[in-house]
Image (spheres, rainbow, N blue to C red):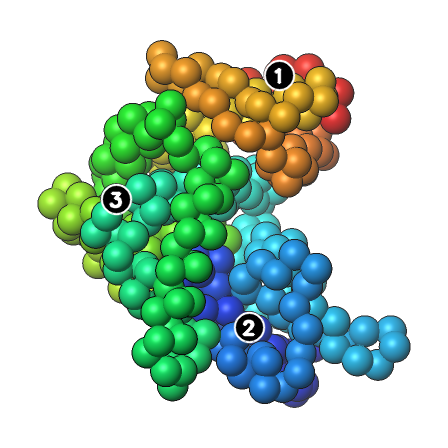
């Protein structure tokens, strides 16, 4: 496999307020892959185009016509880099552990982001900080009046998108109760081992990290909760920012034959919240409904149907089905009784 030092640096465009940008930058640092980070103003200066859906981060790769083509979506990109670059893998070699890592990663990308988006755009102090700071990352030297107008437009647009991620008056209490529970479970795990996947990080660690860069260290309301209830998590985020100096060993991966008991509370939290919503979303998509309704923690959850999360669930189910008999038995034993097993037992057409 090629090593990035011998090739052109990877081009990545994004912003510090994007949890997925931070996720991928941390992966690149850990894997010691050469890259160039482009702010939105630098992307514009270079004349690069964003993807049709301008998600952050975006990478640019040579296309068949010779130009640079934008590519987004952090999880497939991580797998692409695993194939293209040798060493310091973030996908475990054990298929059972790789599957659990993918489940943890998807939970972070598709559920922890609900915490992040809700706290940032549902509380006045958080709205104020985000609206004041985030627009500067698209051009620091723009005049104050331009920044002020951009701040207003940005806040209005993001608040208007709350329904897309499931933050609304119906779901607010569920979200706000869930974040402290998640912190407690993750903090307990970090007391036993430094990463979700053992003594070396997996893709899921960088997914958790990405969301927590905002929840634990930027947005005032969840940051205060984090510092009060889980300062260890706050410290973990600072450490995972740059793991280029650690030297992982093959034996550092966690064992699925003797799984850490601290996984179970995290998996139970996943089964309690993420699982019923993902399944309800899949059922809504199957039925052609625009609205998702689920029961989460005894309360009604209602949000817009989200096709991308339907794809995420399908990918997880395909990965579960692709496991060998022994690995599937191992995974199912770990998931049994957490609520996560329902992801793979319920009949879904799509």
Decide if residue 313 is on the left or right side of residue 30: right
Q: Residues within 10 Å of mark 1 (few under 14, many from 20)?
A: few
Labels 1 & 2 near each other (Cβ < 8 A): no
- x and y percentages locating residue 116 in the rendered image: 36, 46
- Disc number at residue 123? 3
Earlier residue among tags 3 and 1: 3
> Residue 268 occupies which quadrant of the picture?
top left
Residue displayed at 44% across by 40% down? 162
Q: Secondary structure at mark 1?
A: helix
Label 2 to label 3: alpha-carbon separation: 28 Å
Q: Nearer the viewer, residue 142 or 295?
A: 142
Pointer 1: what residue?
345
Q: Are marks 3 and 1 in contact (CB under 8 Å)?
A: no
Q: Considering depth in this image, is 81 or 69 the residue closer to the camera? A: 69
Q: Judge depth for marks 2 and 3 and give the one in front.
A: 3
Report how far apart the C-alphas of labels 1 and 2 lie in the structure: 39 Å
Residue at screen point 74% across, 71% down = 69
x and y percent of residue 13 in the render?
55, 72
Q: Which residue is mark 2?
A: 13
Which quadrant is the C terminus positioned in?
Answer: top right
**Residue 70 position (above or below residue 169):** below
State the CA–CA distance, disc 3 to disc 1.
38 Å
Which secondary structure, mark 3?
loop
Give the percent coordinates (x, y) of residue 254.
42, 45
- The secondary element bearing badge 2 is classed as strand
């Amino acid at each position: 496999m090629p090593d990035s030092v011998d090739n052109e640096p990877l081009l990545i465009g994004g912003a510090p307020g994007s949890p997925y940008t931070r996720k991928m930058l941390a992966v690149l640092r850990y894997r010691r892959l050469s890259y160039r980070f482009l702010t939105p103003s630098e992307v514009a200066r270079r004349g690069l185009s964003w993807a049709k859906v301008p998600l952050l981060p975006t990478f640019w790769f040579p296309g068949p016509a010779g130009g640079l083509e934008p590519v987004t979506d952090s999880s497939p990109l991580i797998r692409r880099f695993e194939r293209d670059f040798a060493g310091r893998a973030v996908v475990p070699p054990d298929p059972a552990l790789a599957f659990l890592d993918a489940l943890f990663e998807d939970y972070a990308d598709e559920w922890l982001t609900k915490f992040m988006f809700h706290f940032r755009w549902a509380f006045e102090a958080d709205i104020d900080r985000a609206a004041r700071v985030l627009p500067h990352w698209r051009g620091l030297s723009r005049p104050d009046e331009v920044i002020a107008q951009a701040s207003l437009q940005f806040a209005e647009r993001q608040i208007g998108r709350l329904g897309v991620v499931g933050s609304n008056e119906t779901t607010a209490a569920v979200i706000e109760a869930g974040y402290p529970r998640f912190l407690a479970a993750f903090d307990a795990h970090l007391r036993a081992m430094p990463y979700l996947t053992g003594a070396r990080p997996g893709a899921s660690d960088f997914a958790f990290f990405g969301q927590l860069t905002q929840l634990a260290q930027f947005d005032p309301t969840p940051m205060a909760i984090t510092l009060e209830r889980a300062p260890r998590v706050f410290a973990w985020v600072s450490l995972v920012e740059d793991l280029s100096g650690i030297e992982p060993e093959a034996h550092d991966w966690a064992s699925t034959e003797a799984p850490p008991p601290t996984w179970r509370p995290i998996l139970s939290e996943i089964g309690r919240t993420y699982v019923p919503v993902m399944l309800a979303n899949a059922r809504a998509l199957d039925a052609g409904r625009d609205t998702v309704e689920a029961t989460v923690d005894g309360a009604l959850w209602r949000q817009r149907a989200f096709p991308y999360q339907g794809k995420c669930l399908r990918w997880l189910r395909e990965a579960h089905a692709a496991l060998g008999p022994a690995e599937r038995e191992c995974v199912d034993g770990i998931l049994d009784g957490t609520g996560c097993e329902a992801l793979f037992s319920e009949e879904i057409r799509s």
